[in-house]
Structures are given as structure tokens and as C-alpha cells.
Image: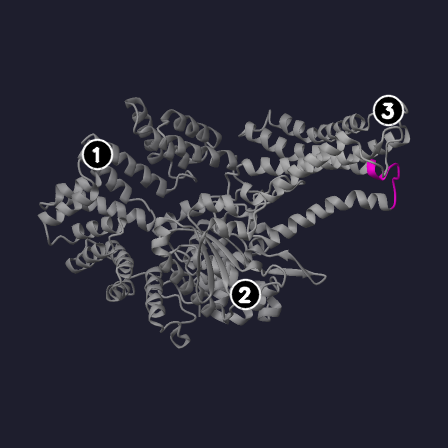
Amino acid sequence: MCGALARELARSPDPRATQPGRLLATSTLAASGLAVALALVPALIAAARGIVVTTCDWSFGLLAYAAMPLATAALAGASGHALGVLLGPRRFGPAVAITVLPYLALLVAAGLRFYGAPPVFSYSPIAGYFPGNLYDENVQLTAPLAWARLEQLAWVVALVALLASLLDAATVRVRLRRPALVPAAIAAGALAGALALYYESGALGYRIDPADIEAELAGRLETAHFVIHYAHTKEIDREIALVAEDHELRYAEVVAQIGAAPAGKLTSFYFADRDQKGRWMGARDVEMAKPWRREIYVDHRAFPHSSLRHEIAHAVASEFGDPLFGVAAKRVAGIPMLVNPGLIEGLAVALDWPGGYDRLTPHEAVRAMQAMGMEPTLDDLLSLRFFAVSSARGYTTAGSFLHFLLERYGAPPLRTLYGTGGDFAAAYGKPLPALEGEWKAMLATVAVPPEAIEASRERFRGTSVFSRPCPHAIAAAREQAVAAFVTGDRAGALALMRDVCGQAPEEPRYRLELGDYLVGGTPAERAEATALWQHLVDADADAPDVTSSLRADASEKLARVAAQAGDLPRVTALVAAARLLSTDTNARRQLDAEAYALAYPGPAGPLLRNYFFPAGERSLDPHQWALLATLVEPDLGFAHYLVGLQRLATSDWAGAATELARSLDLGLPGPPFVKNAARRLALAGYRSKSPALVERAATVLAGPDMTAVEDLLADDWRHRLGFDAGTWPDRSTTRAGTDRRGGRSE
């Protein structure tokens, strides 16, 4: 279209035209304007639709449309017109190819940059900005997009000005002659600006190379299997040796399970926090890997890192994945094209088993989903429909299935399955339905208590980001509300959260959060908060989105308001009511602890009650209340348990280990506290370099009354001790085919 305008000018030149710069500037602006006008048509249609369909964030939508489709149209119109002027009135043959090739080259360049550099985001002249992953809901348009667009504009201005300097205005043809001074000067200036921006593009954040990230993460540590680039912070510098050991253990665990290791070392980019990771590689709220680059990108978290083994599994799988991207992808005409996200993420979950030690194993979780009618189908998970399933359900189910295959048939066929992108017949000699039947038969042997099923409903009730209303606007508003509240802008935070509740009135968790912002305000706001929470407590039992976990959470919040008013009987009644509801293990243990403190008749009783429910202004912190309780009753194990938890929170590892071990010696008021004391003792013992305490904790966790998760956690700590001592992994002692107390796979 814009080329056609150039051809029309060339066919019908104005013989009176004498100023090529003005002529080309005018026609270029007309071409850009025409392209923008056409790009506005879908925007107007969307705006008309927005009259009858909820539009959550008009300002962001307008900004995004202007910065991306409209800016692309303007640049494309100008550059297309310039190419048309360069080629003259020809319409066919090489002229068409020359017109199309620059845009194909831009697409290829964007793909090569994604392939050859760590960032998952892309700033391109065509797309404008692509964030690179589906799980960062709060997509933000920041300064790098503006810098990228400015560089792109500079290149286009340089091209147009260069052509203008060589243009014969009378014929509208480009001639090889002495360039006109003014357009040539403009071209030179624009070219210099484009080159300067290109040179600084890494620092400006829109064209980041490995060297840019390595410069940002100035720390470097090389181990047997990793090159770790890490951010220099006080905490990371203090713990980098531990971080490196964690990398090596998780690598050894993954390799021992899958029976393959990549050649050479993996690279780990270890960021200070999610914001730094988002700034430099694009995945703000998720950890990521690029298997073909054998790189992982994680932010600093409490030891042991919760996502490290999962991301290492992605990188290790590159050894048997497709030869181009190192992932599970079927080939078309010999080229790996049909990526299988269910296999990619399912394998990482299967090797990072169970993926978290504070919830059900994936096998147990799938059983819970089956009972609730929430289980996704394998057909959906092993196709691109994987992205239409919530991540909690999709990752968990795919991981359960692949872990079953790993346990029953071993690693070699699973590697073949992954490398072929899902050819079950080639890998196992039987089709997917037969293997699915075997998996479901195994799952039928996994017993999950009804209360655990109901407690997991909150985790799995969510939907895919594509199915939720206003995901970007809501994520942005919630983050802005937190920032406003932290800076003292309560009114702004409340306005934002009210808007969130208005945009998604069906989501009860947002009303729960709104109450948190209200409760510290005026009496009227406090009353509104209690009304919101009471409404959740009293919600119809059949309300699908108000789960027992949310009701229990709301009850506990009401209890804290009652405690502030000194109404201890109401506190007791609310906690008792919450304990009747099914909640996850952490929430259940908290409620049990509160109930124990409320009912404890001994001398330490008032101190324990103040630990959980301080009345009025808190004069002492929780650590002090717990410490006083140990002084009043030195033989009360529960008081020592609370002191241990508080010391753990301040990284007093030796002090925490001493108190937690003493709490186990003196006795605790129930199995949940024994489990948690042992879990925390393992961490405190390891951090305080006391292997004997870690082994003691592992012995408790592997006891006959513990669940599959505790048993697996005990194994994990023993692996870590053995790895440190050089005695693990030992394949002769590994236990294949068994998920103890969580159901046998054979």
C-alpha cells in the first residue's frame, strides 16, 4: 500500500517540485498516516465492543495499542514507502522480494536473538514488545520499549533522509549523485543516534546480551557442573558457597534419576530478587531455563531453593531433547516444530519430586483433583491446549504421569519419549491410552483423606490466565495497592483494592485482601472489614469459589479483631469453628497452635495467648512472649518450639536447633507440631553444621506415623548429608517403584 503510493508518485511526478526533502517528508508522513489509519480500524471495533463488554484498563490498552500496533504501522508505513521510492514504479519480480525481505530479516533477527541471548522478552520493530512468558500477569510497558522505538525511528529517519538526499524531485527517482546537504546531514545525525542507541541498548534494557547480565551479576563462582553468575548482595555474598552446594546436589539428584548428563557445565544466573530478574531477562514472577543454552535463571530464595531442581531438570533434559531447542518437540520434515509443553514441564516436575514438602505429592494431588472433578485430560496436557489449563493443575498432573512412567519403566524410555516429542509407541511399545490406564490404576491405590481433598480445593480452583477476567489489570492493581500501602497511602491502596473487587466480584480472595487493608483504619473501615470476612465465613457451603480454606482464613482474621477488643471467648469460638474446616497443613497447624494456647491452663497460658493474640498495642514481640513462657515453665515443649521458630526467623541457626531439639525431647501437643519441629530442626541443624541433629530430624520424619511427603523430605536431607560426605548418590541404595505411604506404583 505504502509502496503503491511511492509508485504512483513516480508514475505521475510533479514537474514543479524542486525540494526533494520536503517532497519525500510529505509523502512519507502520508504513507505512515495511511498505515496508522488502517491500524486504527480494529482499535475502533474493540472500543465499540468495550461499550457492552467489560474493559478493565482503558489507559493501559490505549498505551499498549499506541506503543505497539500503531507505532509499528507508522514505522512500517514510512519504511515501506521509502523502499517503494528506492525501487521506483516496478511492481513485480525482484522489487517485490526486496520489499518483503527486510521484514523477514527482522523476524529472523528476533528469533535469533531469542535463541542466542538469555532474555525471554523481545523488543522488535514488528511486535513492539513481547514479554516472553505467560505467567507474569502484570505486563508493564517501561522505558526500554520507548528506547527501542526511538532507535527504530532513528533508523527509519536515516533511511528516508538518505533517500531524500539522493532524490530527483522532478522524477521522484533516486539518483547516484552528490547528496543534498540538509537531508544528508539529517541522515547522518539520525544514523549516529541509531548507532549510539544500538551501542547502549544493553544498558538501556532492550537488547540484552549475556555480557550485559554478567556485568550486572558481577559475582562469579565456578563449580564442578556450573558457572554461577550471582548478584552481589550482603546475604548472597554470605551464602554463595551454600547456594553453590545446593546447585550441585540438585544436579546430582536430577542426573541420578534420568540417567543422563549434559556435556560441559550449566550456567546459572542467580539474581538478587524478582525485580532484578524481570529487568534483565524478563521472567519476573517465574523461574525459567533455556535448555538449548543450558542456562537457568533464578532469583535468590531461602535455602534450600524451592525451584532450583525444577530448572536444572529443564537444562539437563537438553541432553536428550530435540537438537535445536533441547526440549520435547515432534519433527515436521525433520525439523522440531511441534513443541509439547506437557512433556517439558511434566518431566521437570517428575524429576523435582515432589516439588514441595508442604503439600500433597503430585500423585496425591491428582487423586484429590479426581475426587473434585478437576483433573485435566492427558490429551489436553500433551498438546498446546496445556496453556488453557491452570498451571497448578497442568504441571501437577503431567508430572504425576511422567513420574509414574519413570518409576515403572525406568529412565531410558522416558528419555526416548521426550526426545521424540511424545511418540509413546516408539518409547514404550504401547499407545498412550494403555499407559494412561496403568497410571490411573496406580493412582487408585493412593489413599487421600477426604479432609486433605477439600483442603486442596483452593489450590486447584484457579483457571488459566486466558480464562480469567482482567488478569493484567487485576495483577497491576494489586501490586500498586501493596506499594501504596507500604508508602503510607492507605486511601490509594483501598481505592485500588475496591476496583479489583469490582472487576472480579466472583473472586472471594480479593474481598479477603480488601479486609486486610481496611481493618487498621477508622471504626467504620474496621466494621467493613469484619463484615467482609463474616460474609465469607457465612457463605453458602455450596458456593464453589468460597472454599473451606478461605472460610478458615476469614475466621482467623475475625479472631484477631476480637483479640484486639479483648473478647477472648469470641476468639476461642472463632478458632474452634475454623478448626472444623478442611485447610492445608500449615493453616491447620496454626489453628491447632492457637487453640492449644487459648486452652492451656498452666502458668505460661497468658504468655502463650499473648504470643498469638496480643490485646491492644503489642508491648512485646512474639520471641519475647515465647521466651518468657520457657522461663515460667521450663519443661513446656511447646514454648521451646515457639522460641525455636522465632530464632529460625532471625537466622539464629544454633539457637533454633537447640530449642527445637529440646521441644522434641520434652514433647509437643500433637503430630503436626512434631512434624514441623523436625522439619525446622533439619534446616537449623544443617545451617549450624550439626549433621547429628539433621539425622535426628530425618529419623523423626521417616517414622511410621508420617506421610509420604515427610518420608521424601527425610530422604532429601539424608541425600544432602551423604552428598556432603561424598557417599551419595549410590544407585545400589535407591528405591525405585515406591512412593511410601503415598501409594505404590508397582
> Where does the magenta region start and end?
85-93
Amino acid type, mark 1: Ala
The residues tagged by marks 2 and 3 sit, at their Cα atoms, a distance apart of 76 Å
| Depth check, front residue: 617 or 690 | 690
The residues tagged by marks 1 and 3 sit, at their Cα atoms, a distance apart of 85 Å
Compare marks 1 and 3 and give the one earlier in the sequence: 3
Residue contact between numbered discs 2 and 1, judged by CB atoms under 8 Å: no
State the residue position of label 1: 563
State the residue position of label 3: 17
The residues tagged by marks 2 and 1 sit, at their Cα atoms, a distance apart of 55 Å
In the rendered image, residue 145, in percent from the top left (x then y), is placed at: 58, 37
Secondary structure at numbered mark 1: helix
Q: Residue at x 33, y 35 (%)?
A: 537
Amino acid type, mark 3: Ala
| Depth check, front residue: 456 or 189 | 189
Picture quadrant where residue 525 is located: top left
The reply to whether residue 441 is in sight is no
